[in-house]
Every structure is written in structure tokens, then in C-alpha cells.
Amino acid sequence: MPLQTQLSSAISCPSLLITMQTLNNQQVATTQPTASSQPFLKIDNVSKVYATPKGTYTVLEGVNLEVQEGEFICVIGHSGCGKTTLLNMVSGFAQPTEGEVRLQNKLITKPGPDRMVVFQNYALLPWKTAFENVYLGVKAAFPDKSKTEKTAIVWEHLELVGLTEAAHKRPWQLSGGMKQRVAIARALAIRPQVLVLDEPFGALDAITKEELQEELLTIWRDHRCTVLMITHDIDEALFLADRVVMMTNGPAAHIGEILEIPFERPRNRAKLIEDPHYYELRNEALDFLYRRFAHDDVE
Amino acid sequence: MAVSSQLRPQSAWIPKLKTQGRKALTSLIALVIVLAIWQLLCSGPEPVLPAPLTVLNDTWELIVDPFFDNGGTDKGLFWHLFASLQRVAIGFTLAAIVGILVGVIIGSNAIIYDALDPIFQVLRTVPPLAWLPISLAAFRDNEPSAIFVIFITAIWPVLINTAVGVQQVPSDYKNVSRVLQLSKFEYFFNVLFPATVPYIFTGLRIGVGLSWLAIVAAEMLIGGVGIGFFIWDAWNSSLISEIILALIYVGIVGLLLDKLVLMIGRLVVPGGQQGT
């Protein structure tokens, strides 16, 4: 039971109960045997309060989430709901005011290469080529490896994202999609346990976005890393995630509901859209975001 | 956005050449007009200042032979300019080294920055020549005093721009370094320095311009070989034409210094982040 514990807030959608069964089987098959029943990543009763000139501002309050190893989690919610704050506490850029975040039972206190981040605006160093950007990460993560080994790792990951030909171009010579590929290659090359993506495809056009989503899934299947991803896009979340975490509106946002996405992998976008169940989930999410937690115009 | 920037290197060549040519032509016409007006205004029987043709006539020997050396301060214009440039080179190099180092330090530490910034803001407004008496008092010699004046004039823009550049390193780059846990050394050479270089060069450009302004003024006071002294000497001998010629040289050298720093900056500033 703790292995499958989902969340404090109960899920009361009938369609979800049906799918729980399939999900269980699938997870038992894919989840690598962990040493204990401890979850891989545990966000435990986390609150975040900022001090402002006008007094304190509670961004997040009482957030609980347990993530299994190898899971793909999408976090969705309106802007200002503290999604980024939540992920920053996983990556270690921010500390919870209350509660704690643990990875493999180890308290997270600062950023580290085991929780690599893919930033929304790529965060590539403009004076370095694609290759050098990835190499910088590899050099920092594997100081003991030889130069040949490090170079091989960089090439392997540039190939993974299909960028070998653009390896010696600088970021300003690359399109948005290519830049994000470099950022993903850099993130994966250092073999993180958790990959944190903050709206990675938000700035891309629809076609590039779909391509990258599929590439990300392929890579995720091969690498078996745990993924936490922020998105605004419901379809993106449904296509990618094992679970979609939906946040309530701030201030004092918390996790409102978690959708289990039971579709078999590898997923096929065309088939998925024909699945009636896809629409149930989609409506569920839309209902949550635009009716129950519609964004007020006050902001 | 990406497409247009990819096209930039090749396709910009020909139109650029055209606009350059047009610019050169228009400046040339403007120059001729200015000279003509000057000639007209100063062509009376007792002109206040010599007209361009008079200047040319009076200074022809200096123009055609800038390399003569009769000992003492009786040298060709080349030697005067060369002496001034030497002082600028030494003072400005010192200012660049110290300015960049101190700028990086105060830029990366908010407390030191807050503590020192007011002092710098006050010192930077002190006119270059006001430092001369104090440096003469301290060094008791003309040569180091002149160099000190250059140094103290050029250091502020370098220092302040470097500090601002360090503070402006985009937080994304800092975050990447934090996730990757780059060592201080790696961070400096891979992130901080390249991100700051455009700011440093902005400071260096302002600094070299100020140095040149300061040296001419300082040399008028301290004497010896140098273009500033040459101007002062010409004034004392009422050789107004020589002054005018020297001013033109000073202007041209100042322009070349500015372009030189700009060019070095273009070469050094890493690709993709030019435009400062």
C-alpha cells in the first residue's frame, strides 16, 4: 500500500478507479525493485512562505507527493500557483519553509547534478558550442573520467537528440527546438536520477513540440530516469505522464488532484486521441483547471 | 529569428560595403564644406585664427617630416605622439588590470560592493587634472605622475562596468553552474568571465578615451616630450597653425585608440552576445 500511496487528496473519479488496475500491473512491471518501501522522491508536507514588504505570502501550503523511481510526472496549474517553486525545492534552488523534500531518503538542501534541470529558456552558454555546453556538464559530473571517455559521452548524447551535425554551432545559430535538444542532451549526459523540466517546450511551435515530446519519451524509456515536468499544456501532460499533478490556485496552493494516466507505452499520439478514455481524462483536467479552479481575473 | 541570424554573415556583406561607401562620401563632402566655411571666415586681412590653407602652409615641414629629432623637446610630431601614447599605454594597461580585478571582486560580493560603491562614485567624478598636484606630491617626479593621472582616470569606467557586468550575469547561467556544481575556477572561466567580457570592453573603451583626454592636459602642465607639451609650447611661441595641426592629430589618434579597443573587443567578445 505505501508503494502505491498517491496523495493526501482523494481521487473520486469513477473512470480513474477502473484504470487503477491496469496501472498497478504496469507499475509493478516497470518499477525497479527498490531497497525499501520508501518512495524514491518524497515531498513531505511542504509549505513555502515568502517575506514581502507587505507581509508574508504563502505560495505553497501542505504539499505532499510521493514519486516512484522511473515515474514520469507532469505538474499542471495556472501561472502563479507555485509549480516552479515546488520544482525548485526538488532541484534544490529553494528550501521549503516547512516540511521537507527527500530523494532516496536523503534530504535535499542544495542543487546537484543528481537532479538536473532543463530550463524553460534553455540556459545554454552563448559563447560555447552545443558540444562545449554538453561537455561542460560532463566534465563537472565525471571529473575522474578521461578526456576520451567524456568526449564519447557528449557525442553519445548529442546523437541521442539528433544533433551531431550541429555540434559545433553556437546557440545563436540554433533554432529554439535545437537549443532545447542541446539542453536535454546536457541534462541527460550527466546521468541524473531525477530530470526536472520547467515548461521545456513552452516556447516552441506545435510541430517541434510534438517531435520533442516523442523524443523525450523515447529517451526516458531508455534512460529510466524519473521525470518531473511543469507544463501548461493538458494534451502534453496526458501524452507524456504516468500521473498528472494538478495544482490549485495560489496563494497557499496545494495539490488539488492527481490524474492517473493509464495508457500503454509506447504511446501513439494518433491512437491516443481516438481513445474515449483520453477525453474523459482531458475533460477531468479541463474541469479542474477551468471550472473548479478557474483563474480569477484579479492578479 | 534563428533563420535571419544564420544568414547574417554572408548576406550582410554587400549592402554593408555600399552603406560604408555612402557614409565615407557624405563625410568627405561635409569635411570639404566645413573647411570651405573656415577658409572664408578666416581669409580677411588680419584673421583671428589661421585659415586651413595658412595652417597647411605654416606647418608643411612638420607634416612632411614627423620623424626629425634635434634633441631635447625639439622633435617631430611622431615622437611627441609616440611619447604620449607610451604614457597612455602604461597607465591604461595598469588601469585595465586593476580595474578588471577589483571590478570582479566587488561585483561578486554585494557587501563589498555596497561598502565601496559610494567611494567610487565620488572619486570617479574628480576631473583628471585635479589628481595631478596630489600625484606630483606623492611621486615627486613628472613621469610617474602623468602615468598615475592616466591610471586614475581610466580605472573608474573599467572597474564600474566590470562590477556591473559581474552582477548582470544571467541567473540562468548561475543556476546551471549551481546544478552542475562547477568549481569556483570553472565558474570563473566558463561562465563569469565570458559573460562579463562585453561589459569590460565597454569600460575599456570609455577608459581609453578618457586617458587620451587626460594625457594631453597633463602634459601641458608637466612638460617633456609629448603632444600636450607640444601644444603648450606652440602656444607660448604663438604658433597657432602648429596648435591646429596638433589638435587634428590628437583627434585622429583618439579616434584610432577607440577603434582599436572596439576591434579587440569584437575579436575577444565571444560569439552570439555582441551588441554592447
Image (tube, coloured by chain):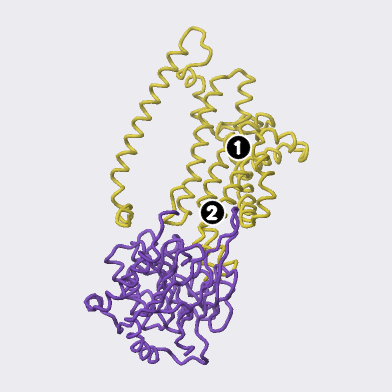
Chain colours: A purple, B yellow
Badge 1 or badge 2: first in the primary sequence: 1
Which residue occupies 56% across, 70% down?
A47
> Relative to residue A211, is residue B188 drawn left or right?
right
Residues indicated by labels 1 and 2 sit on the same polypeptide chain:
yes
> Relative to residue B97, is residue A91 drawn left or right?
left
Report if residue A168 is visible in the image: no
Q: Is residue B90 above or below residue A9?
A: above
Where is residue B276 drawn, in percent x and y? 47, 47
Which residue occupies 58% across, 72% down?
A110
Chain ID for label 2? B
Which one is in front, A42 or B259? A42
Task: Mark 2: give few (<14), some (14-19) or many (20+) Cα within 10 Å.
Answer: some
How many angstroms separate mark 1 from mark 2 (CA)?
A: 35 Å
Where is residue A278 drawn, in percent x and y? 28, 76
Residue behind mark 1 = B84
Where is residue A134 drawn, in percent x and y? 44, 71
Where is residue B173 drawn, in percent x and y? 50, 62
Q: Quadrant of the C terminus of chain A?
A: bottom left
Q: Is residue A43 above or below residue A202?
A: below
Which quadrant of the view contains residue B2?
bottom left
Instruction: Between label 1 and label 2, give the one nearer the viewer.
Output: 2
Q: Is residue A203 above or below residue B28?
A: below
Residue behind mark 2 = B168
